[in-house]
Amino acid sequence: GDSVTQMEGPVTLSEEAFLTINCTYTATGYPSLFWYVQYPGEGLQLLLKATKADDKGSNKGFEATYRKETTSFHLEKGSVQVSDSAVYFCALRPFGNEKLTFGTGTRLTIIP
Amino acid sequence: GAVVSQHPSWVICKSGTSVKIECRSLDFQATTMFWYRQFPKQSLMLMATSNEGSKATYEQGVEKDKFLINHASLTLSTLTVTSAHPEDSSFYICSAREVSAGEQFFGPGTRLTVL
């Protein structure tokens, strides 16, 4: 079945550091890929998405590129801020299916 | 826009009792709502998909008689955990899919503790 494997946390970085959170997936066909963010006390929010190979999703300085050859969708940000502290979830949705499959989440803490 | 609320945000109950959790889409109509369960340091696991006015579709391994789902309107779905036991203690999250869009919007979750 479909699955998502993401980098285990927690991850702690200093402000303005470069961030990478790895995500790889297993799925048949061509799924859509997502990154969700969960701030403390809030629900999951869609951060960015990509629906086909080589698409790059971007939002709030975060980027991720859909790499079919490596089945990856790594999340990156060039300079993180304290306000980026949250839990990040990688997810996939199979083509023609509305169900989401999530990774385990990565807790990110940014220290001033 | 696209706000989903859950009530209560946390609940503690005695073993053997039933607990109802509400999920509401506040500013949009949701034909489909999803219920997830999240264990500590683990992923969100889809429990069931509910469509307004019809029976919910449960994922394999989820007991439909224990986790009763009702989606009576386009803005409200409820999950009732019947005869709760300590192993049902978990974080329950709902999401709602807007009629005209493919994206799911998530509620803040409900933490259930069964004593």
Image (spheres, rainbow, N blue to C red):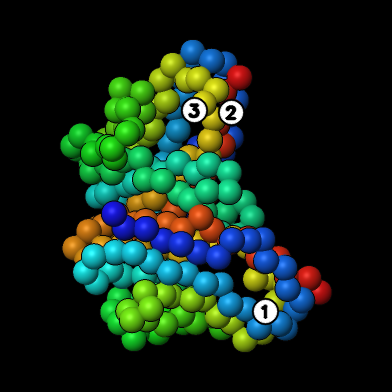
* Sequence-first tag of 2 and 3: 3
Q: Amino acid at mark 2?
A: Thr
Q: Chain of mark 2?
A: B
Q: Chain of mark 3?
A: B
Query: Relative to A27, does residue A78 appear above or below in the rendering?
Result: below
Q: Position of residue A42 (x, y in %)?
A: 57, 54
Instruction: Quadrant for residue B60, please give it.
Output: top left
Query: Relative to B86, does residue A71 appear above or below in the rendering?
Result: below
Name the residue that disc number 3 marks: B88
- Gap between marks 1 and 2, in whole Å? 35 Å
Label 3 Cα crowd, 10 Å radius (few <14 / some 14-19 / many 20+): some
Name the residue that disc number 1 marks: A80
Q: Amino acid at mark 3?
A: Asp
Q: Is the N terminus of chain B in the top left, top right, bottom left or bottom right quadrant?
A: bottom left
Residue drawn 43% across and 36% down? Answer: B22
Q: Is residue B45 visible?
A: yes
B9 horizontally vs B104: left or right: right
Q: Amino acid at mark 1?
A: Val
Name the residue that disc number 2 marks: B113
Q: Front-most of B93 and A106?
A: A106
Between label 2 and label 3, give the one nearer the viewer: 3
Q: Is the C terminus of chain B in the top left, top right, bottom left or bottom right quadrant?
A: top right
